[in-house]
């Protein structure tokens, strides 16, 4: 056992402390918020958001420059006894996406949860900022953690910050939504923990790097991996474990919905990828990958069709999230089960991750746009949106831009992602996924145009604007939509950056 | 049958009972209790694995015991939060169940 441990005993790399900062900065913010309280909570968050963004940019830049993972060995104790933090290509990209979306949400939320001097202090306004920082810290821990139990704690931190965000307004139906979310999350976390026990019992370590060399394709590994995957699927809201998502994401206040839909569900997806690609490479069989792919395909069709049938804008967007999560799971049949020799695996890998990042930007901006529309009109009934295009042209334009990415129309990040995934399905001979993706694109076009058609039509009844919408908040949503479009200018080829620090580099096509 | 196997079986039974209760029982408080039964089963398995010495080859392995303390703290916090939400739901509506047909009803976006 000792020699194996020695072989994997990574050293803390230069600037490794940045990883610790990424996790503890938001926690420091939470503690300061509790100390100062009152109106200072928002100010603390406003100071910390740019600092955290700078840390994420620095980590991304360092991984980019050195072409290798950033590692920090906590307390100098090496795994398996100690815990390592590791930022590889996907962690760095995920951290940067998280930082950008959280910062944008913070600026956007000032219009809703700001407490200017003289106005009454409300508890929701204080709690929102604390939860936002909690989600940030939880997500950073999830993407940087290298120990399965540590990741369990990170996942719980994320859940504990996400659930109250749903019921922030305290209405009956949002409390119900939060409770249902909580129950799914509890089941998910306890199944994950059960898998963790089995892995520790069988292999004597929970460190992902060490496990990758020890796990054998045998029943205990399969059972543990299945339990953990099912648990994480419940938290990711993959069809058919999606029941909690629409009321929760639609019921949260707009900035909350943006963070929940764009980032929080991706945290548990990230762990599923870590589990199958990094902790247990080679364990996924063709059959099990087809099951995950089928669930993804079911999510795309089911989520899109239900989105078409919604009468409220926020629920429509929430069902669209269920559909868009489905695409992510094509990464398993197309990259995990085909082996590292498959030349198109790297294409599918890049496609899957780009889908995650572009959906994060597009969905965050879409929920913000929907929030602004609901604020201006006092409702979000799709049938009564007529004329809003004239009143809030920038917001409706933002909705359309984000919609381009969800449909997969060029130029947008969604297009590049779906194109790469489509390419991989065809080249690997798994054409059945291609059929689902094309159908999903058409259905997405259907629900986006349903909203745009109503919004751009002239008003049948004179529109009543109940609250003015600030231009700066519209610009924040537009900026995020532009990020989703900008990802569309990435080259249509496998990204080497997303493979930095991976135990086995997936096949690269030589041209 | 040695003690590790016996406790292993007990853990498995608790996990099964908890899972059954969590999924089938419509009462929210019972669901939360079932989650705790399920969690206890998992913690017992941690103990069993510590006793077996895991793969480290020692007589008893201290690592699972360290993990289980953290696990209990997390489960406790989760239970607290679920109970607080449930209490709030009871205060607001006077009911303590979520009927399955609520899922499609959604929420009133106009108030968000």
Image: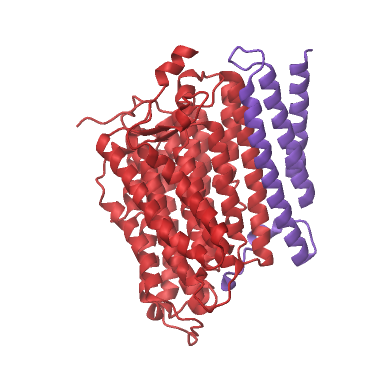
Q: Hey, which quadrant is residue A21 in on the image?
A: top left
Rendered image coloring scheme: by chain
* Left or right, A493 with reference to A104: left
* Left or right, B26 with reference to A392: right
The number of numbered discs placed on residues in the rendered structure image is: 0
- Residue A300 visible? The answer is no
Q: Residue at x 67, y 46 (%)?
A: B78
Give the colour in which the image draws chain A.
red
Q: Is residue A70 above or below residue A396?
A: above
* Percent position of residue A336, x then y: 43, 31
Q: Residue at x 53, y 54 (%)?
A: A30
View extreme (bottom): residue: A462
Give the colour in which the image draws chain B.
purple
View extreme (front): residue: A35
* Quadrant including the C terminus of chain A: top left
Q: Which of A403/A425 is in front?
A: A403
């Amino acid at each position: 056992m000792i020699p194996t441990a020695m072989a994997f005993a990574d050293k803390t790399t230069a600037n490794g402390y940045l990883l610790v900062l990424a996790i503890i900065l938001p926690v420091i913010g939470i503690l300061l918020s509790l100390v100062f309280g009152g109106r200072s909570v928002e100010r603390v968050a406003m100071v910390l958001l740019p600092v955290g963004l700078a840390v994420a940019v620095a980590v991304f830049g360092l991984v980019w420059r050195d072409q290798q993972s950033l590692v920090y060995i906590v307390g100098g104790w090496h795994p398996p006894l100690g815990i390592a933090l590791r930022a590889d290509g996907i962690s760095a990209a995920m951290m940067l996406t998280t930082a950008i979306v959280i910062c944008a949400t913070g600026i956007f939320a000032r219009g809703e949860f700001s407490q200017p001097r003289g106005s009454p202090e409300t508890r929701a306004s204080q709690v929102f900022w604390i939860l936002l920082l909690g989600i940030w810290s939880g997500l950073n821990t999830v993407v940087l953690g290298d120990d399965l139990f540590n990741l369990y704690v990170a996942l719980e931190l994320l859940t504990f910050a996400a659930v109250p965000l749903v019921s922030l307004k305290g209405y009956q139906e949002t409390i119900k939504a939060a409770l249902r979310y909580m129950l799914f999350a509890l089941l998910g976390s306890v199944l994950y923990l059960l898998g963790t026990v089995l892995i520790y019992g069988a292999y004597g370590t929970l460190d992902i790097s060490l496990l990758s060399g020890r796990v054998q394709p045998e029943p205990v590994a399969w059972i543990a991996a299945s339990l953990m995957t099912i648990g994480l699927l419940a938290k990711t809201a993959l069809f058919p474990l999606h029941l909690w998502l629409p009321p929760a994401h639609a019921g949260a206040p707009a900035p909350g919905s943006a963070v929940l839909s764009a980032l929080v569900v991706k945290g548990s997806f990230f762990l599923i990828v870590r589990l199958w690609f990094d902790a247990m490479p080679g364990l996924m069989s063709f059959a099990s990958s087809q099951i995950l792919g089928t669930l993804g395909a079911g999510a795309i069709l089911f989520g899109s069709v239900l989105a078409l049938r919604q009468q409220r804008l926020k629920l429509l967007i929430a069902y669209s999230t269920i559909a868009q999560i489905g695409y992510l799971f094509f990464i398993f049949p197309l990259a995990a089960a085909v082996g590292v020799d498959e030349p198109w695996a790297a294409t599918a890998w890049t496609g899957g991750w780009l889908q995650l990042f572009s959906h994060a930007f597009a969905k965050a901006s879409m929920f913000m746009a929907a929030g602004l529309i609901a604020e201006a009109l006092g409702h979000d009934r799709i049938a009564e949106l007529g004329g809003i295009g004239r009143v809030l042209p920038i917001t409706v334009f933002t909705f359309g831009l984000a919609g381009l990415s969800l449909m997969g129309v060029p130029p947008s990040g969604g297009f590049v992602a779906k194109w790469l995934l489509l390419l991989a399905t065809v080249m690997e001979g798994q054409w059945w996924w291609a059929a689902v993706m094309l159908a999903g694109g058409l259905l997405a076009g259907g629900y986006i145009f349903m909203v745009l058609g109503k919004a751009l039509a002239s008003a049948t009844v004179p529109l009543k604007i109940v609250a003015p919408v600030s231009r700066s908040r519209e610009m924040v949503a537009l900026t995020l939509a532009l990020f989703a479009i900008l990802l569309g200018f990435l080259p249509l080829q496998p990204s080497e950056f997303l493979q930095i620090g991976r135990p086995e580099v997936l096949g690269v096509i030589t041209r | 049958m040695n003690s590790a196997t016996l406790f292993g079986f007990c853990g498995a039974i608790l996990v099964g009972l908890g899972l059954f209760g969590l999924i089938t029982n419509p009462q929210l408080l019972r669901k939360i209790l079932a989650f705790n039964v399920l969690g206890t089963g998992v913690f017992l398995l941690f103990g069993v694995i510590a006793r077996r010495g895991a793969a480290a080859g020692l007589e008893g392995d201290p690592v699972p015991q360290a993990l289980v303390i953290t696990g209990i703290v997390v489960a406790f916090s989760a239970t607290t939060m679920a109970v607080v939400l449930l209490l709030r739901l009871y205060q607001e509506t006077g009911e303590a169940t979520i009927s399955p047909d609520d899922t499609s009803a959604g929420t009133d976006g106009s108030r968000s």
